[in-house]
Image (tube, rainbow, N blue to C red):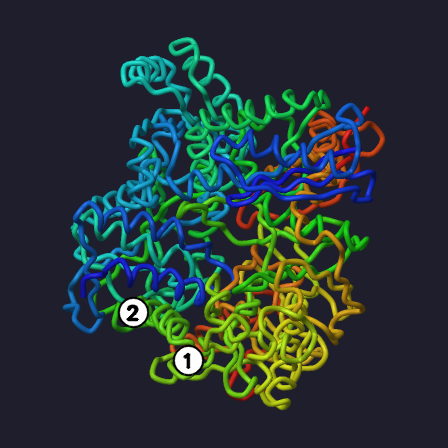
Amino acid sequence: MKLNSEQLRDLAVGAAFLGTGGGGNPYVGRVMVQQCLDEGLSVEVVDPQDLTDDTLVIPTAMMGAPTVLVEKIPSGQEAIFSLQRLEKHIGRKAQATMPIEIGGINSTIPLLVGARLGLPVVDADGMGRAFPFLEMETFGVYGIPGSPMAVSDEYGDCALIEAVDNRQMEWLARAVAIRMGGCAYIAEYAMSGADVKRTAVPNTLTLAIRIGEVLRRARVEHRNPIDALLGFLPTTLYRYGRVIYAGKMIDVQRETKAGFAMGCALIEGLAPFQSVMEIEIQNENLVARVDGKVKAIVPDLICIMNTETAEPITSEDLRYGQRVTVLAVSVPEIMRTPEALKVFGPSCFGLKEPFTPIEEID
Amino acid sequence: MRIGIDVGGTNTDAALMDGPRVLGACKSPTTSDVGSGIVTVLKKVLEMSGVPASAIRAVMIGTTHFTNAVVERRRLLEVAAVRLGLPATRALPPLTDWPKDLADTLGRHTFMVRGGNEFDGRKIAPLDEAELVRIGQEIRKRGLRAASVTSVFSPVTPEMELRAAEILHAEVPDLSISLSHEIGRVGFLERENASVMNASLADLSRKVVSSFRSALKELSIDAPFYISQNDGTLMVPDYVERYPVLTFASGPTNSMRGAAVLAGEPDAMVIDIGGTTSDVGMLMNRFPRESAVAVDIGGVRTNFRMPDVLAVGLGGGSIVRDEGARIGPDSVGYEITSRSLVFGGDTMTTTDIVVAAGLEDIGDRSRVARIPAKTIETALDTIHKIADGAVDRMKTSAEPLPVVLVGGGSILISRDLPSASKVIRPDNASVANAIGAAIAQVGGEIDRIFSLEGTSRDVVLGGAKAEASERALAAGAKQGTVKVIDVEEVPLAYLPGSATRVRVKAIGDLAVE
């Protein structure tokens, strides 16, 4: 499938939704890819099932603060430097690239790389949403080492990292990204087509596009976009979704702890919802509670949407007074196994509550 | 005494005020030269109130002129859009994602230079001064008269923009240069967009400001004058000449603030009911609550702070259907005087309903005599439900707030609204804009990323507050009246050293001798 401008716009909306509050606003990424399309380049999206087992796939991404990215626009070459450095190290050319994170801006970086290098982009990713750390990947959960990894800036400075494990890789890369200005571009988790089929969350690029499209169409046709979205989800791997709360933002607290944007959003319920929902945030929305009782918890998606426009709201854009609707959505089974929960389950974020699938919470 | 003037696309309004009291108000058509329309309306308002020109201490002008110029792509200069940031930022050159016609109007003169800073003040690259000299020569060769300079992280570290301006001025001494750190906040593309638009208005802003000046001179008003900006505070004329974009959202802001003064309520919901829509906004401490989302002006993405206004399809021309159960969102609009029932048309509108209910006497009452009582009752219910729902959606707490009604369509609301503590219909509501301009205060704002490393939050916030207050004073605020009205901190994810984005806004009363 070749991406068109409308799909790109839809993707930006769907990616913001899947970002569950984090992952950065995809606007800059979308416009960078649009620029490629305007120059006559194209983005070819391939289904993971269509990869041959020995295809070399090198995922690409941005790491660091999305807040820096919106000010320090990239040169557009950074992620390409990283991919090429990794190719050189491995001694083989990549035959495709792929997102590591579908939520937020990182859904768009591989599209830029794919357009510039003429590489297909695999319709899959390793987070199925947004997460703050590079080790939080289904790739790693199912045995793919993140390193060797390349981290580059706009100069073509490049650090090659070989770490003992994916956590250590994240730790080292983070330090490099800060030296590079708080935001850097990476290539990591190089793998075969067979490994993609085994370890990736499949079809998330097209899922994000479809989410954007469902919301857009509902708006145009004057249907309720949130109902339309809930009607659509059962046809995907994110098969269960429901509104867990609706109301008004009555408080947003934010502070920085250990490099995380920690925070808490309080939503006062509007009928039929009573009491107050508290959503704990660490870059992404992690857990939603009402009266101390868990209503949804990571890695299931907790998405705060503007009740009027059904636009996803990022943590940074949460404001006192907004009318919001909170959706919880089940993630695919590959993200809910015991091995997966060991890497990005509630305990990885210091939460005491165990993971309970949204389907089992009333 | 002060005079507030609102130069709109259609009418120029004036309101003469003594403190919060309106001594006189009137309207006159806006003229293409702007100035003669102002002269006419000023003469009228002075005449009707019997106040001599010498008693006027300050004149405040609100205008949508610059916004309209961009929206209509008229009277704009071609602009050299200079960016400091290479090798970063190359992926999206200046004017990316602009409407094609507007980018064409501005001539697509884009230049990218090595320079810019990181979030913590380090240089991305040393400023390429030789290249700037070459660009200066190129600007001269192309005969351009306006330029914008945008450097990465200039709201934190403005030095490179200042140095670039020096170099360009040395090459082209009469070049009008818009520096992005003076205009916008962190968010590169939006700030650059605003700076380029600002540069394109350099000629028009000089002309408009000088026409304001000569209009006042013609009437022998020698009081200082000010122009209102987006956030409801004032700028001195010299500043507007240089930064006309800062007036882009002043219209809705003035309207809401004017309504607050008319009603005597600092915290209130304002419903401005027109022919097609009702705009609902919230005043907190006499200022409109601002929208958090990026705002498009003439199709260009900016990050101006605009009032957060909810528009719902309820106006004096809204079409009534289903025996009153459904109203709008479509409207007969300006055709109300031919299509509505009371004016001899065949479409039932909300205006017909209030006439039929005996609440207003407009047009020919006999033409609505046959509307069933049940339809009238249902329609009135629906109208109030829509208005009440809109107010409730915009409220930030369950506390009922006073609701202030302005605009020609405010006749639709005759009952109390459940979400309102009271409903106020002030006099002079049709010149709320001019009144909003007249009562504007002066403000100063900063928006920057600070590192808390090696310092404390209190020190950083204290410094930020002091700087915002200083900016308010520099803008003309009276010593001793300046106070900080808004502090917002957003910690930046993934950055060390507790980098935090801090916004502070301070305002004060205008120093009027």
Q: Is residue B102 visible?
A: yes
How packed is label 1: few (under 14 Cα within 10 Å), some, or many (20 or more)? some
Placement of B492 over or under A120, stated as above or below: above
Comes first in the chain, label 1 or label 2: 2
The label shown at residue B216 is: none
A107 and A133: which one is in front?
A: A107
Could you say where residue A81 lies in the image, as x and y percent from the top left? 27, 41
Residue at the image point whose x is 75% and y is 61% from the top? B425
Could you say where residue B252 lies in the image, as x and y percent from the top left? 60, 50
**Kind of residue indicated by mark 2:** Thr
**Chain under label 2?**
A
**Front label number (1 vs 2):** 1
**Chain under label 1?**
A
Split into 4 quadrants, where in the image is the N terminus of chain A?
bottom left
The label shown at residue A206 is: 2
Could you say where residue B496 lies in the image, as x and y percent from the top left? 57, 43
Q: Is residue A147 left or right of residue B366?
A: left
Q: Is residue B498 visible?
A: no
For disc 1, the marked residue is A228
